[in-house]
Amino acid sequence: MQGCHVNTPTLLAIQVGKPAEQGADSISDKPWQSGIFKATVSGRVWLDMENLAGDGQDDLKNHGGAFRAVLAYSADHYPKWREGLGVDLQYGAFGENFTVSGVDETSICLGDVIAVGDVRLQVAQPRLPCWKLARRNGFKDLADRVDKTNRGGWYHRVLQTGYVEAGDAYAILERPYPDFSIARVVDLIHEREVNVEAWRKLGSLEVLTPRWRQRFNGKADTAEAR
């Protein structure tokens, strides 16, 4: 069972961006639309219940909404990616709104309540990578690499709106579910860990995105029917 360790990370950078039409690239000659291209912004940024000011999503089935208002990504992953890919990736390359130091998927847990500036957030879901991440960075197998290394990031819902700014502490105030690190939740959704009791527990947690609760309950139902 994967545990979690409490620390006080820092919000290093904030990125926002609106959905836009993208052209051909090294992976495909077909145009595509996405909000995955985010630009770093400075100063205080307003966060409401669904978005940072200036931010937006294109595919609202898989991104955005109240349970996925802010995507965070560990700054600690960037040196590994730069070395592994041979490219000087900058913050925001993984489509994240918050680039956070000192924490990653093994040390953040589902349901964590976090203070950032004036804001209170709750961790609501892991981010699973899709093909748009590959096209954003020009590496066809990037989504697969992210999945295998469990470096996808995590989404928050907003409990209290307000202003945030790069340099703010990213402080964990509450940890109701220490057994469910984001890395472990990903392993459970992919059945890299098969655990009917854990699936059923996750299916009952209201802090988790409704669609994921349905998926975990479906896994538990299928396993129990065998």
Image: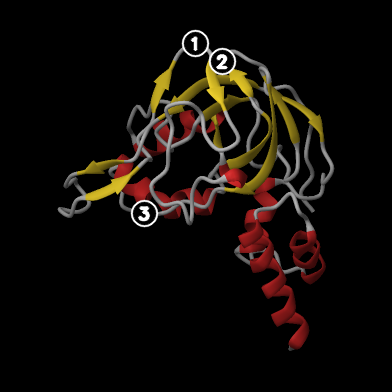
**Disc 1 to disc 3, C-alpha distance:** 32 Å
Q: Quadrant of residue 160?
A: top right
**Disc 2 to disc 3, C-alpha distance:** 30 Å
Q: Earlier in the sequence, mark 2 or mark 3?
A: 3
Q: How is the image coloured?
A: secondary structure
Q: Quadrant of residue 15?
A: top left
> Is disc 1 in contact with disc 2, using a CB cutoff of under 8 Å?
yes
**Circle 2 residues within 10 Å: few <14, some 14–19, many ≥20:** many
SS for callout 1: loop
Q: Is residue 173 above or below residue 68?
A: above
Q: What amino acid does circle 2 point to?
A: Glu
Question: Which percent across, then down, holds residue 223?
Answer: 73, 80
Q: What amino acid does circle 1 point to?
A: Gly
Q: What amino acid does circle 3 point to?
A: Trp
Say whether residue 170 is visible.
yes
| Residue for point 59% across, 42% down | 155
Is residue 187 found left or right of 173 in the rendered image? Answer: left
Which residue is nearer to you in this view: 80 or 102?
102
| Residue for point 24% across, 43% down | 21
**Circle 1 residues within 10 Å: few <14, some 14–19, many ≥20:** few
Q: Which mark is residue 165?
A: 2
Q: Is residue 92 above or below residue 42?
A: below
| Residue for point 72% across, 29% down | 114
**Residue marked by disc 3:** 131
**Disc 1 to disc 2, C-alpha distance:** 6 Å
**Residue marked by disc 1:** 43
